[in-house]
Image (cartoon, rainbow, N blue to C red):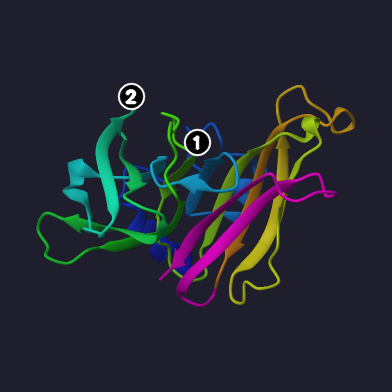
């Protein structure tokens, strides 16, 4: 019953997770039926206030839905729209900060016939002091597909590239996550790769929570014999 309700809510967006035309779909995805997929790219440990964090959310503008960003003191948000050939659309937010600090980005998903949001999306962002020459490319990208804030009991799939060929692996620690549950982790090797040569590929984590709330999911990169060389965290919200 919960999954049926989630599918109905997904109609507010431009597409559904795990459809036949989704190149990223695989047998593991079908096994867990995630309603949300988050593709993450991150460099380094911390990002400077003038480095870009990019948040990508699905938007069904043809159905009358739009993302409206809340005005957060200290955050600078630039918006753009990206449309694909199949007619789907995403809203892209490039976010920087005026100064170092922790901020909560908030966006409301509102239909043009209503005064209240269908979804409220929040994401904690942590910035260090500005640097002299920030890179033009985003330092962190969080690309959401499906329902950004699914119902409790639904499954969220988080994906990130991994490079075991360099000796580094991606790991998570779940001991302090209380109600956030890690159902499974998979490593999908690039085509033609095999386990013996340490081929690169994509890490996939399947997570859920039976209790509504927002939970931090953090991932770090290391060789196991040294401090992490890269780190990212994302907030996952269940309603």
Name the dominant secondary structure of the magenta segment.
strand
Please give the label number shown on residue 20: 1
The residue to which callout 2 is attached is 85
Can you see residue 12? no
Closer to the camera in the image, 51 or 202: 51
Relative to 181, does residue 221 appear above or below in the rendering? above
Find out whether residue 97 is within the magenta segment. no
Q: Residue at x 50, y 36 (%)?
A: 20
How many C-alpha atoms fall within 10 Å of the one at disc 1: few (<14), some, or many (≥20)? few
Q: Secondary structure at mark 2?
A: loop
The x and y percentages for residue 162 are 69, 37
Relative to 63, does residue 74 appear above or below in the rendering? below
Can you see residue 138? yes
Q: Residue at x 37, y 60 (%)?
A: 103
How many marks are shown on the rendered structure?
2
The x and y percentages for residue 3 are 47, 63
Q: Which residues are magenta?
A: 210-239
Left or right of residue 200, residue 12 in this image:
left
Mark toward the start of the polypeptide (2 vs 1): 1
Closer to the camera in the image, 119 or 127: 127
* Residue 78 sits in quarter: top left
Left or right of residue 43, residue 189 in this image:
right
């Amino acid at each position: 019953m919960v999954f049926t309700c989630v599918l109905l809510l997904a109609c507010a967006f431009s597409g559904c997770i795990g459809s036949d035309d989704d190149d990223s779909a695989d047998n593991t995805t079908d096994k867990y039926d995630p309603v949300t997929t988050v593709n993450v790219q991150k460099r380094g440990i911390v990002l400077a206030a003038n480095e870009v964090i990019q948040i990508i959310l699905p938007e069904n503008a043809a159905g009358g839905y739009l993302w409206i960003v809340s005005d957060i003191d200290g955050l600078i948000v630039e918006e753009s729209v990206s449309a694909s050939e199949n007619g789907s659309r995403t809203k892209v937010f490039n976010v920087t900060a005026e100064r170092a600090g922790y901020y909560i980005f908030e966006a409301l998903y509102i239909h043009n016939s209503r005064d209240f949001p269908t979804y409220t999306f929040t994401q904690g962002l942590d910035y260090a002091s500005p640097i002299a020459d920030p890179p033009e490319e985003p330092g962190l990208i969080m690309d959401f597909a499906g329902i950004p804030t699914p119902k409790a009991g639904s499954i969220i799939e988080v994906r990130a590239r991994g490079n075991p060929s360099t000796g580094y692996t991606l790991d998570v620690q779940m001991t302090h996550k209380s109600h956030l549950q890690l159902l499974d982790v998979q490593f999908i090797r690039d085509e033609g790769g095999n386990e013996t040569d340490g081929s690169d590929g994509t890490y996939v984590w399947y997570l859920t929570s039976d209790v509504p709330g927002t939970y931090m999911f953090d991932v770090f990169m290391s060789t196991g014999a040294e401090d992490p060389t890269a780190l990212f965290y994302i907030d996952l919200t269940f309603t």
